[in-house]
Amino acid sequence: MTASTAAAAPIGRSNLQRFVGGYGQEIVVLLSIVALFVVVGAINPRFLSDTNINSIFAGNAYIAVAAIGMTMLIISGHIDVSVGSLIGVIATIAGTLAVSGYPIWVAWLVPILFGIAVNAGVGALVAYMRIPSIVVTLGMLSILKGGLISATGGEWITDMPPGFMIAQMRLFGIPSAVYFMVILTILAALFMRYTAFGRAIYAVGGNMEAARAAGLNPERTVVGVFALHGLFAGIAGILFATQLQVIQSTVPPNLELTVITASVIGGVSILGGTGTVIGSTLAAILFACIGSALIFLNVSAYWLRAVLGLMILATVLADMIRRRRVL
Amino acid sequence: MKKLTLGVLLSLGLMSGSALAASAWTGGDDLPTNPLACDATPGAAVAKPYDGGVPTNPPDRKGKKITVVDIPKLIGIGYFNATSKGISDAAAELGNVDAKTDGPTKANIDEQITFIDNYITSGVDGILFAANDPVAIAPVLKKALEKGINVVGYDANSTPDARQWFVNQAEFNGIAKSLVDNLAAEIGEEGAFAIVTSTFTTPNQARWIAEMAAYAAKCHPKMKWLETVEAQEDNNLSFNQATTLINKYGDELKGILGMTSVATPASAEAVTQLNKCGTIAVVGLATPNAMKPYVEKGCVKSVVLWNPVDLGYAAMQVLRSVADGTLQPGATTVKAGKLGDLQVINGSEILLGAPFVFNKDNIGQFDF
């Protein structure tokens, strides 16, 4: 239920109805966040302290940024199951450049370019060789994960220069990672809604042949959206690398799943064609909220996975129900 | 759609009611505990018959010059460089040992077996090893025993009958005592603390937590355990969990115990980023390199582990005693040079002693 279907909604519905219809899932996620804040805050007011709110928003900012790219990719009808490994590799490249004495802007920029290049390559395989994206990215998952462990030998990167730690910088008391998340989400939302390329992503994901008939070049769009996804994965990797004083040589377990889950719970249809980047960012914030709430309520963090699983099922079910209503 | 929200909240509410009952502290297992005495008295060893292997017709090596090869899991990393240094220190001190370290450059059991096999063929008097796999290494070690070679393990054991003795770097109750004593020294006898662990079911961590709960009940009864949180072996998750603990408890929280080499530095990072250095203590298990920034800044005072140089030194001393015939099955202690008398435990293991505490004064000397 995106802007595209909302725009096509029958005339005669009120603006409010149209808004709710267009952003149904985003509203649900937002209300869940608000409800969590109210309930957990009532049980323990420290949940609403500045520092905790900062932790919640900053803690998953890199996941939100990666989920922006993932959302675009899923809207175009594809998926990337290797994004967690890519973020790990990007973080390691960035950290290695930073400790090897390269200028800090090089340590920030080169890994992002690497992310774009790798994913443009993946996109070319998907678009021109017609290999399903899940197959290509499963291959990438193994290549990146194995390559990372072989290259680092399990050693952690430490002693990075302070100027490199961009995610730890603060402006008006708010961690910079939060600004990245908010600004990139807004830019991406505007891009998806108002640019020809953004509209083409929806069109290709909705129906590739119809998009071709309408004069679009689906192959070029797919390569482009993969490259964009690489850009966001690159930025996420830099945020991830600079959050702590050490970069682990292993990729965070299930990071790709967390990113994909954020997109899905944020309202992207796994079938492609619909969804918004605002939804995925809200979902990433919701995950951080739940993770924090579990500790405040003395619940094992293991339940986070169970809760997320439950939410995926509920979201997909809701998507089905809403589709039937629209049809 | 409201149902989703309601469902999430409802399930959260339900889950908060469930409690795990096993150890006194969440995250511990329910196996029997064996807390050490509150002072430095070593634990009572449970009598257990010798279960190590016996070399077949070894030549009389008493007092004679012997050649020893040390084959660790891998070479070229800080940790095994340190054990290797301990081995050569002991060899130099003994004066009648020709010791060298050799082994694979990756922690690979197949390569390690090949190395051991080649040294058996080339003819050595003693083999020291840290096994990449306790079962897979057994046949080649048994082959060494059959050739009359003395075999002693350290750091990572094999099945007991494939070697003569194993130098055990730390027992669960010893680590538990060191962690709790150091924490009590930093936050006071009535301080409140929380634990960041990998998962509630990870065997080693669960054992340490159960032993800590038992030891604290015995020796520091007024310390207040708040809760245990899981962070797997994930850096960012550990950081987020530690941060949330600090946010949740505010001034009540005086200390964090890190149970893994990932959780401890991440907890120290959380304390640093929230400007709580000096008000919230972090004590935990970790390797010195990961903790150096926090220890050198004074944010963390004690990091508990063992000293790998001492571990290698003890292994070499034990091997010499076995070759000399002064360490026989059934012994209760063994002399280990400057480390003094070490205790025999579990039939055929030798306990290195109390864990080592890395602090501002000594952490710079270690590189692993």
Image (cartoon, helix red, strand yellow):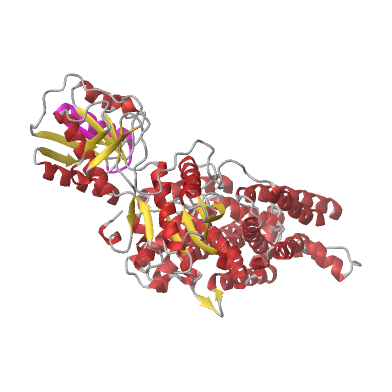
Q: Is residue B221 left or right of residue B326?
A: right
Q: Of A24 and B34, which appears nearest the observer?
A: B34
Q: Examine the structure image and report whether residue A268 is included in the region drawn in magenta.
A: no
Q: Position of residue A2 (x, y in %)?
A: 75, 62
What is the count of numbered marks? 0
Q: Nearer the viewer, residue B236 or A263?
A: B236
- Is residue A249 placed above or below B156 in the rendered structure? below
Q: Left or right: where does residue B104 sit relative to residue B294?
A: left
The stretch of residues the image draws in magenta is B105-128
| Quarter of image, res A286 | bottom right
Q: Is residue B44 visible?
A: yes
The residue lying at 41 percent from left, 54 percent from top is B181
Out of A91 and B29, give the one closest to the viewer: B29
Residue A149 x %, y %: 40, 49
**Residue farthest to the right?**
A12
Residue A203, relative to residue A324: is it above or below? below
Residue positioned 24% across, 48% down in the render = B309
Residue B126 on the magenta span: yes
How far from the left and from the top, in percent, is residue A228? 56, 63
Q: Is A49 positioned to the left or the right of B43 in the image?
A: right
Q: Residue furthest top?
A: B57
Query: In the rendering, at what x and y percent does residue A109 appear?
Result: 44, 69
Which image quarter is the N terminus of chain A in? bottom right
Q: Is residue A157 something one can see in this rendering?
A: no
